Amino acid sequence: MLRHLPTRIADRSMVLTLCAAALCSAACKKEPAPDKGPGMTAPGSGAAPAPGAGGGKIVIGVLSDMSGVYADLGGKGSVIAAQMAVADFGGTVAGMPIEIVSGDHQNKADVGSSIAREWYDTKGVDVIVDVPTSSVALAVSDVTRDKNKVFLVSGAGTSELTGEKCSPNTIHWAYDTWALSNAAGREIVKNGGDSWYFVTVDYAFGHALKNDATKIVEANGGKVLGEVQHPFKTADFSSFLLQAQSSKAKVIALANAGGDTIGAIKQAAEFGIVSKGQQLVGLLMFIADVNALGLPTAQGLILSESFYWDRDDQTRAWSQKFGAKDDGVMPTMIHAGVYSSVMHYLKAVAELKSAKDGKAVVAKMEGMPTDDPLFGKGTIDANGRKRHSMYVYQVKTPAESKAKWDYYKLIREVPADQAFRAPADSGCPLVKK
Amino acid sequence: MSNLQISNLLAQMVLGLINGAFYALLSLGLAIIFGLLNVINFAHGALFMLGAFIAWGLLHYAGVGYWPALVISPLVVGGLGIVLERTLLQRLYRLDPLYNLLLTFGVALILQGVFQIQFGSSGEPYEIPQALKGGTDIGFMMLPTYRAWVMIVSLVVCLATWYVTDRTKLGSYLRAATENPGLVQAFGINVPRMVTVTYGLGVALAGFAGVLGAPIFSVSPEMGSERIIVVFAVVVIGGMGSIMGSIVTGFALGMIEGLTKVVYPVASNTVVFALMALVLLIRPAGLFGKASP
């Protein structure tokens, strides 16, 4: 066959070149970013501060996925949210100017922890915020504890951050896997969805979400029939969905996030999963995901969030301001968490008049009740868990939606005292029993 | 083995064939380009993504639906490919193939970056056309009509391309030009133009695959880069430049990947590369390639 093809094209050296290239392009992505420094820099953070600095000013590091699958959930929106918090706080705290730097961790734990280390050691960063991707957040939490700085997580979901791996230097802000499962899971089991099958992404976050959800389902009288795990960033979900479909479970729960969730929901529609009577649940869904799916595909989905831009007058006002800076895009609960956590951090620094001792700042933050327009009044538990209401929403039908971003209707509010795991049950060594 | 398991395996094989259709379409374009131009076209994934975005853009901005997009989008991508070949690739033919690899890799990164900035990472929705919605229960699985359509149309396009290059006069010119461009030019055939058109055709196939993929996968900037590495593995396993090789390998690898998803799902992303290593050890020129003398 194809005798005519020139021999040179089957030349061995070319094959090797091609393989080398393919492997390189896969491998190169694993290397830490060469510059490691801030991928984007907010106005006013031009010059690098002296090593070990931080005394003369406060530096906030927004560490996020700037270019990958989670970039719309955190990414540049998190930088905007941090800038808004700094501006609303007045630009200075205790007489010190506030700067923002930002960096791209590419969803890789090694890249994230090396950026964090460099920021703390040489850029004078006092606090790192956001950090989607649980494996990265766990790594950054360790570095932060070593350096005695502050880590305010809004992006990542794993409840391990306030469980066995809790830290006196870390506060988990916007949501976690326990709260998501608790809010949506309880609601679904209560309404008859008592047999579950999980489609789980194979890394720290997926496993945490699946484990937390399993506990909630079983505690409420449901049972889990099985699970299929898929690799991070899967393009084609058909095989996994088919396995889930043949399990005959009433509820197919997606324990994944971002692009993976979008792909799975979109393709589930093709296989008639919902139309044949199984219920599809995205355990972690953001408004950006719903926007990417479009209402014809996403309508009817049940999901839980800690923030929705259209909840009340205050969230609307803040979100419109946010949208004006981000091409009309409405903020996710991660963006809201970044704003809220930076505000509360600055309040604590203002009281202490110093940000040098990370542990002291976190203790101060835990000692003060939180209050902001986005999450309302709240508290912080001893394991570093920020406590506020969670909400169960249903995605509107295209007919119900009156404008772009008008996507959710409220099903139920879970009050703050029930929304998150009790500190005593968390397994965190910091909680005195 | 129980009935349930057998029907599950059958279902996964059908799904594998559908994924294989995408691998075949994409690796076919790569094989054609490599066969004639000796260029390892790293921009292929980005052009696949571009094909999908053009389809989305046509619908979103101009109200032009799926069927016209299936024609318009490959034409636009092919046209862009021709411009790319004329202005950039052509200058590097005399140098080591690595230079063109780097150039096309750079083009891919730029394209992906621009779309990321413009449209974000979550992607844009694209609906399955009305005529292809729904599915049929074929006993052991629910086969979505759209996926069946993708499989059939890719097979037809692949075989047609093979026929043109292997069985027609135009194809014989192409093949001759890869053997000895100087001699073919002496017979009065415009070889540089033929090379340009071939590149355009190769990337048009990527654009076509992009439109086919738009309703299945989310139309997002990363949709090409995730797939392109696997497609390169397909080309290497099939034998570089071998057209039938990449078609057969594309479909076969899709099926093997599908079966892996049943047996050991988390390895489904790596099984292709393990196979690639194995094939290279046993047959360095690939399954369908010919070793140099």
Image (spheres, rainbow, N blue to C red):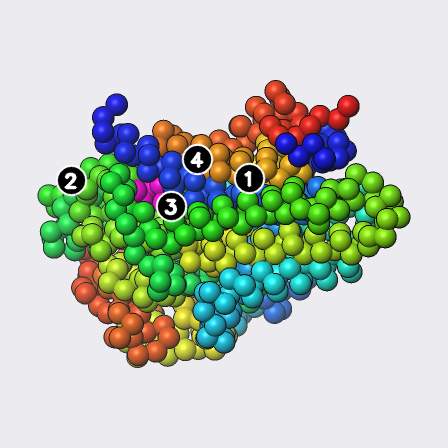
Chain letter for mark 1, please.
B
Q: State the extent of the magenta-drawn residues as a range.
A: A237-242
Question: Given contact means CB atoms under 8 Å apart, are the residues at marks 3 and 4 in contact?
Answer: no
Whether residue B24 is visible, yes or no, is yes
The image shows residue A316, relative to residue B215, as above or below, that is below
- What residue is drawn where x is 53% and y is 28%? B274
Q: Is disc 1 placed on a helix, strand or loop?
A: helix
Query: Mark 4 or mark 1: which comes first in sequence?
Result: 1
B258 versus B285 height, above or below? below
Residue at horizontal 62%, vertical 25%? Answer: B280
Residue linked to disc 2: A223
User: Mark 2 and mark 3 in contact (Cβ < 8 Å)?
Assistant: no
What amino acid is at disc 1?
Ile
For the residues marked 4 and 2, what is the alpha-carbon distance in whole angstroms? 33 Å
Locate residue B126 relative to residue A210 in the image: left or right: right
Say which residue label 1 marks: B247
Q: Nearer the viewer, residue A290 or A315?
A: A290
Q: Between marks 1 and 2, how big is the CA–CA gap?
A: 45 Å
Q: Secondary structure at mark 3?
A: loop
Q: Which percent across, then down, holds residue A363?
A: 37, 53
Quadrant into which the C terminus of chain A falls: top left
Label ID, residue B255: 4
Question: Looking at numbered disc 4 in the image, what kind of residue is underneath it?
Answer: Met
**Drawn side of residue A214 relative to residue B180, left or right:** left
Q: Are marks 3 and 2 on the same chain?
A: yes
